[in-house]
Amino acid sequence: MQRRLFLAGGVASVIGVTSSVRLFAVDNPPVSDLKQSELTVGDAAPGGSLSNIQRIRLWEMNLEEDDNVRFYFRLTNTASRQVRIVHCQPWAANSWVRREIFGPFGQVNALDFYKAGWPAPGWRADNDSNAFYCLINNNGRWDVMQPSQGSNDNNTAHMEWENPQQVRFEVRSHDMR
């Protein structure tokens, strides 16, 4: 009798934990914790190291890793100087790697675009930690723009750079859960 009660209690515990984990995962917002950070960023090099290492002030956020959540991007560049958006993810030992560079983009208003190889509804985040920064073309030299203001709701991260021109970039989600 005690053995049956033990087994029944164990099964009930597993069902309860499984249900609470599933509920917790659904409750995670697609976009959260947008903040400005200063991070060490570089390019992946042979042997697992980084090259072209820089200390960069950028926008860092969490994006939900879920097969039913997809992301796409929206960019507004208010002036004619070209900009690029750089996507970074954690590497190792407090460093980040440049994963992809979007652009260059000239003057655009609310341009929606997707990561290469990820058509609508968009890209599935393969890491919950993500960061973005903006480069501006200064006579052929690409300089890092300093972030100004940003905010996020559960579905979109809004990021801005204002000097020497205004650039707005959004990471937007399609939550199909």
Image: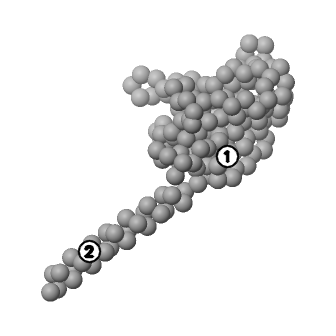
Query: In the image, 13: left or right of 94?
Result: left
> In the rendered image, which residue does mark 2 sit on?
10
Quarter residue 100 falls in: top right
Mark sitting earlier along the chain (2/1): 2
Q: Amino acid at mark 1?
A: Thr
Q: Secondary structure at mark 2?
A: helix
Quarter residue 47 falls in: top left
Q: Nearer the viewer, residue 140 or 82?
A: 82
Quarter residue 134 falls in: top right
Expressed as whole percent of the image width and height from the top left, the position of residue 115 reads 57, 29
Expressed as whole percent of the image width and height from the top left, the position of residue 13 reads 32, 73
Label 2 neighbour load within 10 Å: few <14, some 14-19, many 20+ = few
Q: Nearer the viewer, residue 176 or 82?
A: 176
Q: Secondary structure at mark 1?
A: strand
Q: Residue at x 17, y 86 (%)?
A: 2
Q: Residue at x 24, y 78 (%)?
A: 8
Q: Amino acid at mark 2?
A: Gly
| Image quarter of the N terminus | bottom left
> In the rendered image, which residue does mark 1 sit on?
156
Expressed as whole percent of the image width and height from the top left, the position of residue 65 reads 49, 46
Q: Nearer the viewer, residue 119 or 20?
A: 119
Spatial CA distance of label 2 from label 1 is: 41 Å
